[in-house]
Image (tube, grey):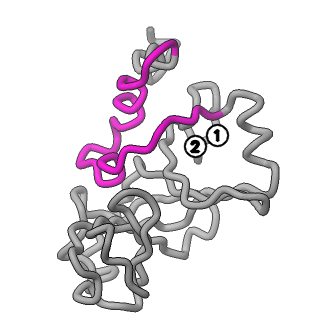
Amino acid sequence: MAVPALRDPNFDRSVIFMLEHGPEGALGVVINRPSELPVAGTIDDWAAFAAVPTNVFIGGPVSPSSVIALATADPDSATSHWTPVFADIGTIDLEGQPSQIPGLRSVRLFAGYAGWQSGQLEGELSTGSWLVVDAVSEDLLDPEPKSLWWRVLGRQTGPINRLANYPEDPWVN
């Protein structure tokens, strides 16, 4: 999660679901930025499973013309078209069909992603630009993503919890 002081417009009050983090770098998607582009008419095969809001999300500034698709499904039903990542969340192969994923419940599509080179994220963490909190699978498909940053902070314990009261514009406080 971005701290309020991180004023990069790509990440201002963003909640990022990390998909990979290792020696080569890190990759995640911003899960609280729906775009105006509906899934229906864009990737029709998956539109019936699109979670509310049924728009493509802005996953991050890297490769905005690429799409990363995440879905909730039966965690024991890994296939070549659905790869578990966390709990009941996994990545899906959009070349396949929804019928090829047993127990498929909901899908969220992300245009682009957030990426960090080797050591870059660790450097940003050491300067306090990001907060690391435990993932909750329900956050990925939250029907009110625009307020997710405040709600995720609100459920934390300790001093981090106070950031849930951080105003949208501190100068108007």
Which residues are the magenta region? 130-159
- The x and y percentages for residue 154 are 37, 23
Residue 172 vertical placement versus 54 (above, below): above
Residue 18 vertical placement versus 160 (above, below): below
Secondary structure state at the residue bearing disc 1: loop
- The x and y percentages for residue 34 are 37, 54
Residue identified by numbered label 1: 8
Residue 54 vertical placement versus 171 (above, below): below
Name the amino acid, label 2: Phe
Q: What residue is shown at x 21% (from left), y 57% (from top)? A: 52
Q: Report whether residue 167 is seen.
A: no
- The x and y percentages for residue 158 are 48, 14
Q: Residue furthest top?
A: 173
Residue identified by numbered label 2: 11
**Magenta stretch holds residue 149:** yes
Q: What residue is shown at x 26% (from left), y 84% (from top)? A: 98
Name the amino acid, label 1: Asp
Disc 2 residue crowd, few under 14, some 14–19, many 20+, Cα 10 Å: many
State left or right for residue 172 relative to residue 88: right
The mark found on residue 29 in the picture is none
Secondary structure state at the residue bearing disc 2: loop
